[in-house]
Every structure is written in structure tokens, then in C-alpha cells.
Image (cartoon, coloured by chain):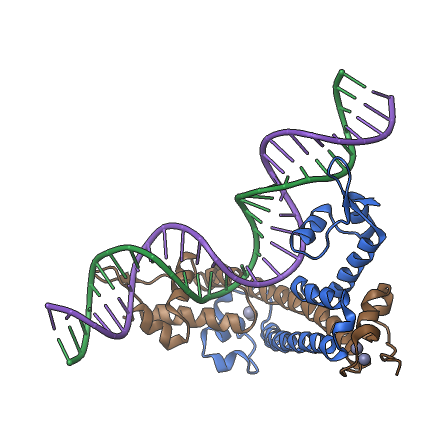
Chain colours: A blue, B brown, C green, D purple
DNA sequence: CTTGACCTTAGATTAAACTCCAAGGTTTAT
DNA sequence: ATAAACCTTGGAGTTTAATCTAAGGTCAAG
């Protein structure tokens, strides 16, 4: 039986996190000491590990709650259900990824056109791109042309 | 002079969003009507466009606030300052991108190993990966082997 | 028998960017 | 003159995953 601080340290999380997981129905201590301290079993430890592994692949705590309810009642679920969760998460991740790639491209283009020097920002190509119409933000930019 | 609903429609945002921007110091109407209605000028419209363009490249509203303060006082800032903001955003985006790519790879691997069929999840390779030690979550997986 | 480390609870706070609501005043059209 | 559509304000709610605080109880060492 681990006390909250022990289990936390073992899994590299804070006690607060474990209380938070309990409050949200992800992981409750299997027992309490006479004085009310939470006592966790190795099964609790395994469950926490499951949660933390699911986090490393990108699932949110709500999604992990679903996963856990399947995990605890496997025989009443099909592979299709589990794969469905993974595939829907994958689709979300790929959508976000696509957005970030757009950001990355735009930012790289803005960065590359700006001289980055000590010249006044009055003719900065980055600001000019943001001032002008949005089609231009993503087009190839003229470098800043600071008059000498 | 546009009323809030007009400007909102023109820029494809909601009136609430404009009030929100005002409350957070990004964009205030230049005037008010006798009855207290917000009245926006074309300069306000341009400023809103600037904000929306900055959003399309990934800047947060706080970052846009910085950008706007430079924009309004260009001569006291250098290209280096502007490029600094862009480059730091780019670094953030790339860090997040790297995390999402890890998620994507793990999820794709999990998905690919699971048969996705109507078989009971008792031997689902996805659940097995999440149950076993974390090194395994990212390794190549055995497909589910449902005993017949 | 007292310090320090640990534990308890409920509830507030954080970041981000809105979105929605209530209760009421204004404008426009019929 | 009255209904519809618009505007005002302040404040609450949403999502995510904690983190922090306050006020207090418990446990082991010295
Ligand atoms: Zn320059
Ligand atoms: Zn520049
Ligand atoms: Zn299967
Ligand atoms: Zn499966």
C-alpha cells in the first residue's frame, strides 16, 4: 500500500494530480488508513500507469476515462470500439497538425523575408505583410527594403 | 462609421468577439453614438484585419497585442524586434508540432496493429500496449491475436 | 512534547479565446 | 405604435489539466 506521496513520486506526478484524478473519476485509492490517508494498491499503480501511457499518445483525460471503462469490461467491447477511439484521436491530431504546419510555413516565410537587423521597423516586411490583404500573408514576400 | 454588427459581419466574426477584443485592449471603437452604440472607423476596420491576419499565422491575442504596440510606434522598434517575435512563435509552433508528430506516430502504430473487428477486446493489441510498460507503447506491435 | 514532513478538505486560480445570458435601451419598418 | 432587429452592460460558463491556498489533522524523530 502506497500513500499518496509515495505513489506520486513513483510515477513522477504530484499528489495534487492524483487527487485531481480521483475527483474526476479516473483513479481512486482502493483504501483509506484509519486517519483518512489514501492507500493505493499495486493495481492502483497499474491503473495510473495505464493513464500516464495513454497520455503519452495524446489522449485527454476524458478520452482516457472512456478507455478505462473499456479496459475494465473488455469482454463487452469489440476491437472495433477501441480502434475507433484511436482512429478518431488520430484524425484530431492530424487536423491540428495540418493547422500547425500552415502556421509554420507562414511564419517561416515571414521570418525569412525580414532582415532582422537594427533598422527601424518602419519598412519591416513582416509588418507590411500583416497590414496588407490576407492573401499576401502567405505569399512569397519581398525582403524589407530600408532606404539608406 | 460601422456599428458593431456591421463590422463583425464584414470581417466574419461575432459582435461578442469585438467586445471581447475591446475588453482586452486589442481594438476599441473610435467613437460612440449618442445612444452609446460603438462606432468603428475604417482605421478600426484595418486594425481588426491586422489582428485577424496575425491570428491566421498562429499568434495568440497576447502576442498580437505586442505586435500592435510595435505597429503603432514602428520608428521606435527595429526589424530585429519584429523578427524576434516571429522566430519565437515559430519555435513554439515547431515544438508543438514535434509533440503532435509523436502522438501521430504512436496512434498510427496502435491503430495499425488492431484488427478493428467485432472480436472481443479481450485480446486487443491496443489495450495490451497501454497495459504494458511504456517503452512498448511506441514500439512495433503484434497484431491482436484473437484465439478462434 | 514539539518540530517537520506528510496528509485531509473545499474551493479559487491559471491560460486561451471566446460564447452566452439577462435585463434593459434604441432604431427601423410597417 | 408596436414588433423585430439591433445595441448596451456585467458577469457566468466553456475546455483542459492541473496547481495553489487555507486551515487544520497525523506521524516519526529527537
Ligand atoms: Zn528589415
Ligand atoms: Zn523586418
Ligand atoms: Zn482485434
Ligand atoms: Zn484491437
**Residue A146 visible in the displayed image:** no
* Quadrant of the rendered image containing residue A1: top right
Residue D4 in the image, given as x and y percentages of width and height: 25, 74
Residue B50 in the image, given as x and y percentages of width and height: 45, 71
Q: Residue at x 65, y 55 (%)?
A: A24
**Residue B35 visible in the displayed image:** yes
* Quadrant of the rendered image containing residue A100: bottom right
Q: Is residue A65 left or right of residue C18?
A: right
Q: Residue at x 55, y 83 (%)?
A: A139
Residue D6 in the image, given as x and y percentages of width and height: 28, 70
Q: Whereabouts is ligand 1, in terms of quadrant?
A: bottom right
Q: Residue at x 80, y 83 (%)?
A: B115
Q: Residue at x 43, y 72 (%)?
A: B49
Q: Nearer the viewer, residue B24 or B30?
A: B24
Tell me the quarter of the image containing the C terminus of chain B.
Answer: bottom right
Q: Nearer the viewer, residue A93 or A128?
A: A93
Q: Nearer the viewer, residue C15 or A32?
A: A32
Q: Is residue B132 left or right of residue A20?
A: right
In the depicted structure, whether residue B19 falls above or below residue D5: above
Tell me the quarter of the image containing the N terminus of chain B.
Answer: bottom left
Q: Nearer the viewer, residue B42 or B9?
A: B9
* Quadrant of the rendered image containing residue C3: top right
Q: Is residue A72 left or right of residue D3?
A: right
Residue C9 in the image, given as x and y percentages of width and height: 63, 41
In the depicted structure, whether residue B73 falls above or below residue A23: below
Amino acid at each position: 500500500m502506497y500513500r499518496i506521496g509515495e505513489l506520486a513520486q513513483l510515477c513522477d506526478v504530484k499528489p495534487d494530480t492524483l487527487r485531481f484524478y480521483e475527483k474526476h473519476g479516473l483513479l481512486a485509492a482502493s483504501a483509506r488508513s484509519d486517519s483518512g490517508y489514501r492507500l493505493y494498491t499495486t493495481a492502483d499503480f497499474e491503473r495510473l500507469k495505464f493513464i500516464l501511457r495513454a497520455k503519452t499518445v495524446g489522449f485527454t483525460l476524458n478520452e482516457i476515462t472512456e478507455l478505462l471503462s473499456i479496459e475494465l469490461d473488455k469482454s463487452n467491447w469489440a476491437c472495433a470500439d477501441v480502434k475507433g477511439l484511436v482512429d478518431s484521436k488520430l484524425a484530431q491530431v492530424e487536423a491540428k497538425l495540418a493547422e500547425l504546419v500552415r502556421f509554420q510555413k507562414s511564419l517561416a516565410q515571414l521570418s525569412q523575408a525580414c532582415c532582422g537587423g537594427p533598422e527601424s521597423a518602419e519598412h519591416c516586411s513582416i509588418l507590411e505583410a500583416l497590414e496588407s490583404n490576407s492573401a499576401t500573408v502567405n505569399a512569397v514576400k519581398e525582403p524589407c527594403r530600408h532606404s539608406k
